[in-house]
Amino acid sequence: MPPAFPERAAWGTAQSLRAWQQQALEAYFGKDGSRPGPRDFLAVATPGAGKTTFALRLARELMERRIVSAITIVCPTEHLKRQWAESAARVGIKIDPEYQNGQGPVGKEFDGVAITYAAVAARPALHRNRTESRKSLVIFDEIHHAGDGLSWGDAVREAFEPAARRLALSGTPFRTDVNPIPFVEYEEGPDGVRRSRADYTYGYGPALADGVVRPVIFLAYAGEMRWRTRAGDEITASLGEPLTQDQTAQAWRAALDPKGDWIKQVLAAADRRLTELRRAIPDAGGLVIATDHEAARAYAKLLRAVTGQGATVVLSDDPTASKKIKQFAETDDRWMVAVRMVSEGVDIPRLAVGVYATSTSTPLFFAQAIGRFVRARRRGETASVFLPSVPTLMAHAAEMETERDHVLDRPLREDGLDDELLAEANRQRDTTDVGEELPFETVEASATFDRVLYDGGEFGMHAEPGSAEEEEFLGIPGLLEPEQVSALLRKRQAEQLAVERRRRTGDPRDDRTAAEDLASLRRQLNSLVGAWNHRTGKPHGVIHTELRAACGGPAIPQATAEDIRKRIAKIREWAAKRRH
């Protein structure tokens, strides 16, 4: 069983709950279960931790105490409605997932309904009448969706203001817009900025320590990209090196182009990793998250060429999408390719390998996407996610264990990459999010293994696809405890350095060459600059200029190891001051 506290929960069925779920129930009802509980409660738990189980346990308790007599579950997608209804049925709660706005009264055989945020926004008065007619508990799955613009937020407030109880759930409660989320409390900090306040929080770090979620190994791939602009000019750039924002966007887009070799090589590497994991996890599955429908279909063809097997393709406009997801979850098929259908909330516990082949770069979407791979079924399972060596994504990966709150009263970013703008684009059409205004034709795109990111550290050196150096990391065993993963990565890094040292100098006694040291320092600085860009919104070039002004020395290509160490220390100093 997962960690639990049965000795502290004589008043309920907590012996079947994880420790955090029982603690959250105690935060709601009190340790002895005697309190009636608050009207509003926000529970933030990392994806894969079991928010659905907690919510349904709380719902059943409220119904048994006759505090509520009806339940409304509000979800982001149609598929999640059915998933909630199936989970509720297993604990004796009957939820109608097919309820439509024009249907009228809910069938007497049901305890409540599951609906989408979009349905609420379409007929808020209808749902207000339903809420007023019975003592209702409203469960908001991924409550941050209620902040998707004023119309959605206003509709949610109007529809569910009369509710007897409201339970808000989120695995990723942060947004970069400043729209307040309905029924969420905000507290003003010493800096005058208002931040959301959760009644109970269970983050990725504690969940990892408890064995509730898997450790995630990020495998980043760089490479040479060449593309032709509309004007006919050919541009070459190296993904993973310091570039302008436009160059990064175009190199990223070239990497994801199905006509180039980068995505082919990365998919082949991901499939080799999946084969390794299936030695220990026989039904382990892989998921490719694509930018648009055309790319998704093309990636599926590439996977067939790599594996000799077809891949399940799930598209947002496919009426059979939910059925396909369910079928894939219940089989041992190798790969699924999807655009947005499985970025949030969908429960496929056997997913263990991911390819982040989308240009969507927001922290919200990234966290939701990675959440598809972290659900643990037994101790020792690991998850592996392949992604482009793009500074924004590197920063997101490095911050996996960082807790975030929804922040109001902050200045809007000026670089055009705010979450709400991308979300609006995604609602209207399935197209590229980054670099769309800069059309070009991919001429060449090749992949290079760059590094592994794990537990805040970076491991590995550049290696060609299919090389022994790459295989050292693709072949990491599928069943390891988190500390074993760290130890193995350190060991393999040391072995690679030793091989490279002998290759370059022929002297095994030197710890590392000056060139290796300088390359490692440059990579470390670029990673920190990427993280600082993510926090502040400043372009990478501006950050490098500010560091050079603060520390002295020449530009990065001419900088010495000591110059770069000073800049690393300075940017860490900035980060420490910002945290405090």
Image (tube, rainbow, N blue to C red):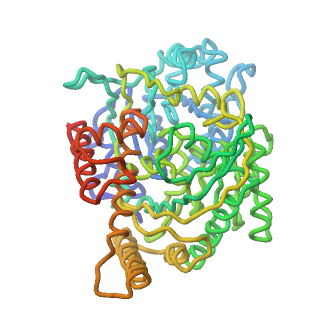
In the rendered structure, the answer to whether residue 293 lies left or right of residue 63 reads right
* Residue 210 appears in the picture as rendered: no
The image quadrant of residue 429 is: top right
| Quadrant in which the C terminus is drawn | top left
Q: Position of residue 78 (x, y in %)?
A: 68, 36
**Residue lying at 80% horizontally and 63% vertically, measured from the top left:** 310
Relative depth, front residue between 512 and 417: 512
The image quadrant of residue 421 is: top right
In the rendered structure, the answer to whether residue 377 lies left or right of residue 306 reads left
In the rendered structure, the answer to whether residue 476 lies left or right of residue 543 reads right
* Residue 140 appears in the picture as rendered: yes
Relative depth, front residue between 429 and 535: 535
Q: Is residue 413 above or below residue 321?
A: above
Relative depth, front residue between 350 and 409: 409
Query: Could you tell me how many numbered marks the image carries?
Result: 0
Q: Is residue 423 above or below residue 56?
A: above
In the rendered structure, the answer to whether residue 372 lies left or right of residue 334 reads left
Q: Position of residue 184 (x, y in %)?
A: 39, 25
| Quadrant in which the N terminus is drawn | bottom left
Q: Is residue 22 above or below residue 217?
A: above
Q: Position of residue 318 (x, y in %)?
A: 79, 41
Q: Position of residue 195 (x, y in %)?
A: 32, 27
**Residue lying at 70% horizontally and 57% vertically, measured from the top left:** 336
